[in-house]
Image (cartoon, rainbow, N blue to C red):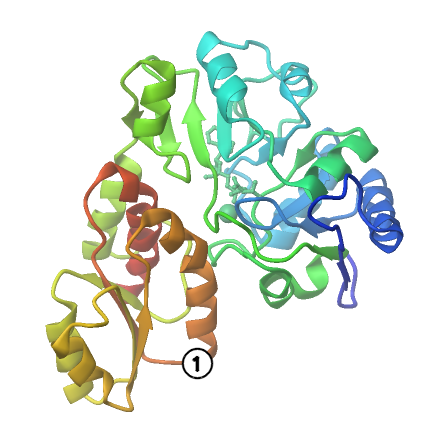
């Protein structure tokens, strides 16, 4: 592990150009060399920044766990160039996996299938399945293709903290624990991929994400279940703090509430300094509370995709202000908001812990 801070190299790749600028190609070459020699490279994907290394080398993979402070029991996602590369790692390739890959790859769909022996045990936390994803990002694709390796890449943050959606978030979280950061700007989706278990019948969404269950159902023609435990468990978690691991958490305690205005008023009266994430900015009550110096009103979008794109960046920015609390309007209880509710309810667990 490096002892000095990593270089951050900007990848200039004009939108319509098929290849990056010569300077960017040099930077990408350095990243490829690092990956080939067991180094850790942080780089953008369309969801969040990933911390990547050769997925087939268990020592390199160990370095990821160390850099993140991640428990060895939590498996990693392996990123592939295409379906063909995915099949070299899968012991079985069910029809559902094929349908999901055909429709959603490259894109934010992670498919869990039985693993082949060549996938090191530490990648899968000793389990018999492997999570595979083909990212829709030119930089990540370039590194996979040029290195020739599938890349193990969790989100490029210390365990239990917010995922990074830009290069500076990576540096702030991992510091000297990463060898190189490729800066490819903001991530488009802003939340982690949808993880789908194709080994279970009926198959299940294990982690809600940018592809929601209705979209999956419309493509597959089958009912998709969501492992609601991951959502409900975290609601329980808010009531019973400390029972479960924290994830996706800002440092500032976050509360989700259906009556945010009353809660904000109450906290202001108690002298707290608050960030209030709300979509009701034109509401007269919001306007009147916003006049207090102790509240920072942050307008949030009314659509789930736009909300996801700004969520982590907003929480990162709020953390820098060292406020006492984040109040967030409870998002709609509909399928399209499932991923947002999942992330916010996990973040909200910090409140009582
Ligand atoms: O969008 C993403 O998925 C990002 C980018 C970098 O690709 N990656 C990401 O990785 O979010 P990570 O490690 O932060 O989250 C991976 C999730 C974890 O919840 C892990 O438990 C689950 O995927 N996972 C990995 N392998 C699995 C497996 N074999 N079975 C079930 N869940 C698995
Ligand atoms: Mg993560």
Q: Please provide percent x and percent y for residue 352.
A: 25, 65
In the rendered image of this protein, does residue 273 appear above or below residue 177? below
Residue at image position (32%, 63%) is 300
In the rendered image of this protein, does residue 275 appear above or below residue 42? below
Task: Count the labels in the image.
Answer: 1
Element type at marker 1? loop
Foreground residue among 240 and 335: 335
Residue at image position (72%, 33%) is 58
| Observer able to see residue 267 | no
Whether the residue under disc 1 has CB within 8 Å of ligand 2: no
The residue under label 1 is 321
Q: Quadrant of residue 88?
A: top right
Mark 1 burial class by Cα count in 10 Å: few <14, some 14-19, many 20+? few
Foreground residue among 37 and 20: 20
Quadrant of the image containing the N terminus: bottom right
Relative horizontal placement of residue 225, taking residue 109 as reference (left or right): left
Residue at image position (33%, 48%) is 304
Q: Quadrant of residue 282?
A: bottom left
Relative horizontal placement of residue 203, taking residue 63 as reference (left or right): left
Q: Please provide percent x and percent y for residue 321.
A: 43, 81
Q: Quadrant of residue 205?
A: top left
Residue at image position (54%, 56%) is 165
In the rendered image of this protein, does residue 96 appear above or below residue 281? above
In the rendered image of this protein, does residue 227 appear above or below residue 179? above
Q: Please provide percent x and percent y for residue 214.
A: 30, 28
Foreground residue among 239 and 94: 94
| Observer able to see residue 46 | yes
Q: Please provide percent x and percent y for residue 244.
A: 33, 48
């Amino acid at each position: 592990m490096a002892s000095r801070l990593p270089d951050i190299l900007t990848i200039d790749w004009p939108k319509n150009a098929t290849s990056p600028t010569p300077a960017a190609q040099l930077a990408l070459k350095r990243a490829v060399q690092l990956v080939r020699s067991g180094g850790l490279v942080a780089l953008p994907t369309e969801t969040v920044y990933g911390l990547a290394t050769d997925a087939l080398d268990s020592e390199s993979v160990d370095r990821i766990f160390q850099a993140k402070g991640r428990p060895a029991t939590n498996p990693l996602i392996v990123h592939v160039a295409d379906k063909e590369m995915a099949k070299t790692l899968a012991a079985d390739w069910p029809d559902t996996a094929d349908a999901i890959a055909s429709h959603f790859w490259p894109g934010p769909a992670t498919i869990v299938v039985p693993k082949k022996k060549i996938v090191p045990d530490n990648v899968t936390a000793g389990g018999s399945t492997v999570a595979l994803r083909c990212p829709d990002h030119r930089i990540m694709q370039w590194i996979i293709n040029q290195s020739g390796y599938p890349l193990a890449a969790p989100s490029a943050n210390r365990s239990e903290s917010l995922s990074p959606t830009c290069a500076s978030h990576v540096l702030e979280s991992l510091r000297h624990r990463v060898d190189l950061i490729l800066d490819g700007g903001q991530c488009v989706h802003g939340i982690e991929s949808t993880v789908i278990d194709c080994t279970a019948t009926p198959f299940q969404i294990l982690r809600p994400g940018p592809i929601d269950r209705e979209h999956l159902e419309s493509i597959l023609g089958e009912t998709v279940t969501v492992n609601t435990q991951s959502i409900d468990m975290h609601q329980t978690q808010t009531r019973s703090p400390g029972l479960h691991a924290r994830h996706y958490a800002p440092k500032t305690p976050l509360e989700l509430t259906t009556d945010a205005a009353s809660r904000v008023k109450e906290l202001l009266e108690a002298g707290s300094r608050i960030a209030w994430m709300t979509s009701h900015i034109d509401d007269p009550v919001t306007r009147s509370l916003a006049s207090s110096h102790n509240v920072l009103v942050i307008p949030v979008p009314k659509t789930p995709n736009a909300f996801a794109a700004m969520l982590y960046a907003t929480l990162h920015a709020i953390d820098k202000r060292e406020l006492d609390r984040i109040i967030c309007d409870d998002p709609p209880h509909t399928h399209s908001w499932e991923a947002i509710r999942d992330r916010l309810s996990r973040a909200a667990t910090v409140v009582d812990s």
